[in-house]
Each structure stands twice: as C-alpha cells, then as structure tokens.
Amino acid sequence: QYSAMTTTITLRRRRRRSVPVFAVVLQAFAAKGAICFTPTAKLARNVGSSTSRTSQLFAKPPPKNSFDLEAIEAFEKQLEKEEASLNIQDSVDSDDGGGGPISSSPDEDFKLYQITHDMDNMRIDLAINQFEPELSRSHCGSLVKDGKVSTSNSSDGTKFTVMKRKAQKVSAGDVLRVEHVADDRPEEIIAQDLPLEILFEDEYMIIINKAAGMVVHPAAGNWDGTVVNALAHYLSKKSPFGSGEFVQQDGSVAAEQGEGVDVEGTDGETVFLRPGIVHRLDKGTTGVLVVAKTRAALAALSEAFAARNVKKTYAAITVGNPGNRVVIDKPIGRHPVHRQRMRVVPDPSARNSANRVVRGQMMADAMASKPPSQLGRRALSFVDSLAFDGKLSVVQVRIETGRTHQIRVHLQDRHTPIYGDDVYGLADWNKKLSKTHGVQRPLLHAARLEIDHPMTGEHMVITAPMAPDMIKTADAIWPQGRDERPDLFE
C-alpha cells in the first residue's frame, strides 16, 4: 500500500556491498513501476567512501478505483454456466424433435446434443454418428472409449456421467456432451517400399513373417512405416497374384477400408486404417501374420478367428521356468489405472499362497459392481517349457483366445515374465538383455499358425523361424534346440 508522499532515505555503508545491493533492489522496484527512485549520487561509484549517500524515493499514489479482478472473472464464469444451464433446460423441454446441437459455439471445445424420441434406446456411438455424420462410426466409438462422451438425464442438465462403452444405450431426453477431438488420421494410406518376408500368397490372402519393431496397421503415433503401408506398395507394384480388392493399382488405399470387421487382439478397440487385417501382433512381436486381399476372404478369416478355428502357437524366452503342461485360464481386462496396460482380473474365489480364499464374498460384491471393461474376458493359454538353463527358459505357448497382450500378461501373472518386456517384465533383466545383446523388445514370436484356406477350405500349416536376436538367446539356453525343433531356427 502506497501513499502519495515523498521521503528521503539515507544509506550508510556498513559492509562494502550493502549500498549498491540496496540500490539494485530499489531499482528493481522501480522497473516494476512500484516506485520512482532517483539517486542523488552515483552509488555504483565511491562505494568505499565513508560519507552517506542520500536519495529521493517517490511512492506512486494508489489507483482511484480499486477492484478485485479475480472476483469479477469468477462472477462472469458463473453467469456463463447459469446461461448454459438455461439453454439446456429450454431445449430439453421443447417438443420440436430437432435433435440438433444445443450448444455449438466454435469457441467451445465440446458440443451438447439432445436425444430425441426416435433415437430412444439407440447405441451411443450410432447416436453420435447421427448428430455428426461427417465422423465415421468407428471414430464415434473411439470417442466413447476415450472418455470424450458423457450423458446427463438430470432435471437441470448439468450433471454428466462419462460413458465408457460404445454399445451403451441412450434414452429420449438425455443430453450428450461430446468433446471435440482433432482427427489427425490421414485420408488414405501411403504406400511404402518396406522389406517383407512372405511365407505364402495367392489372390485371396497373403501371409508374412512380421519383423520386430513394425506396427501392423497405422495408428496414432505410427501413421506410416507399418505392415499395411508395406503391403500397399508390394501388392500394387510387385505381387504376381494381383493387388486384391483393398489396394488400388496406384498403391492408394481408402482410410475406412476394412471397418466393421473385428480384429483379434484388440478386444473391441476401435481400429482405423486396417484393410484386410483380421488379427494383430504387438509391435515388438515377430512371426506369422495373415492378411486378407478380398472382402470374401476377410469375412471368412474373421469368422474363423472368432470361432476359434485357428490354432496359434508362440515361442518365447522367459525369466524363470513356467513349467510343463501348464494351463492358464484367467480373464484379462484393462488395468483400472494404467489404461494402456492389461492385467489378470482377480478371481473372487481364488486362493492365495497360503491356500486361503481371499476376501471371498467381499471381493465378489466388489467385482459385481465393476463395469464390464474391468471384469475382463476369458483368456486361455497352454504353456510348455522346452529348455531351462537355470535362469532363462525357451517356452512354447498355445493360445485358444486372442486377448490383448494375453501371453505377456499370463506369463507375468505366473511370475515368469517374457525376457525384454518393458511393460510386464523385470527391469533389471531387461537392462541386462539390452546391454549384452542390444535387444530392446519382448522376445516373443508367433511361430506356427494352423488355418483352413478361406476360399478352398484346404487345411494349412504355416511356420516361421524366430528372428536372429531371439535365435541368439535361444541358442545359449538350448544348444540342442536346432536339432530338436529346427522349425523355430530355420
């Protein structure tokens, strides 16, 4: 607080630097506009002098009108909130059946929509698509799964609940709040000349041995450099069996090609840019990958995977020995906190290490109240150790289901995680693998796939050798492996 006055201060030197330091402080205040400081002498000079230095300090007068800016801004926000509530209530009470946006200001980062009577009991992703037809159905579902959509059925239309399942139904009179999310997906897939190891191909499908570090299809953070980008180039430029129905002769692929088909390994996750893709391998996983080239083959292959008519066998290097003839039948669901990770969902009747039931009824009641996304889906794996050197194992895993990260999660739950897995593995062991062999990926390989041809019905057995980095580690653990299981090494 300042008063309109002028005062004279006297600076006496007690220590050599006290006078200039104080001068700097006063000058700093002057730079902020708080005071007017005019020294009567050059304080930077004659510091060693024993005489006093006198300066004039002018305090600025206070403003004539004082106000609380923060209080005014808070009041304005409250007015805007109340105005929005009135607009929502007016729209909900109206009977015009419009169903358009209640709030659609370009300055807002969300839109509000009212569910009309003809949209009663409609899936929420379809409802969003009705309001915003320029968005694809898959993108609408992705908004729901990402927590960008909420509903309100309260009388004042201000209490919103976030929706998590795209299959949830809406009711007439509900208000949808849809957050605007920039869709940075490319409109078409870019054909790229990338190396592919082809195991089988005809005019209906192509089977490759996917390399480590290659993502199967374009997604956020990996819009190019994927298997789909490589196939777009190969099928249009090099394939002796033609490009199929998804890829044009010039290598272009429509972004929405392949939508409407479930992709195994995604657990219902919305997947864009996936022409011909029916199952998925993680980025660090190598091995057999089947891709359809025609719509008929895509439908048949998708049905075969869904009906579990495809036998999938993997090889992995694990820390520790998981054992032989091990059956792991534990549901897998998304982690409630770390949403990018999966986990084995606790069983209410499971026994702990002391062979005691863990909070039986209490846990059962808690699980009953959880949403389906956290309850998990059944996951079944069969594990056999092929070799064990006292620290590491070469194991074979056959899976009946295709849940996201299934093998990695199941082996972690058994306390024998995959060597090199930076998400579910052991950090110390992973550092050792990186330092010793320069490997920074989970040593997991899709070694064998048994499937009926989608058009001819012929039973096919496709095998793929492990990648060189995995072979090197397996050789050290299992010296006789090349003789006992040559299909894994050659």
Image: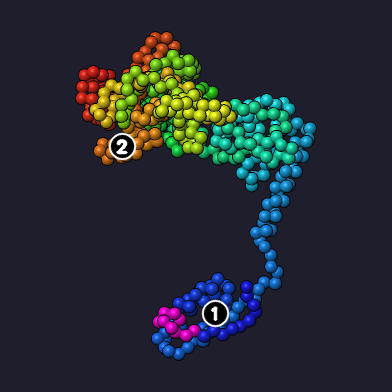
Q: Is residue 180 above or below residue 198?
A: below
Q: Amino acid at mark 1?
A: Phe
Q: Amino acid at mark 2?
A: Trp
Q: Is residue 15 magenta?
A: yes
Q: Is residue 372 above or below residue 435?
A: above
104 or 347: which is nearer to us?
347
Per the image, the residue denoted by label 1 is 37
Determine the main secondary structure of the stretch shown in magenta: loop
Magenta residues (range): 11-19
Mark 1, mark 2: which one is toward the viewer?
Answer: 2
Give the percent coordinates (x, y) of residue 246. 47, 23
- Report the quarter where the N terminus lies: bottom right
Specify the label residue 336 is tagged with: none
276 or 251: which is nearer to us?
276
How many callouts does the rendering have? 2
Counting residues from the start of the chain, the first of labels 1 and 2 encountered is 1
User: Which residue is drawn at the image coordinates 38% and 10% (left, top)?
Assistant: 459
User: Which residue is drawn at the image coordinates 58% and 29% (left, top)?
Assistant: 369
Per the image, the residue denoted by label 2 is 429
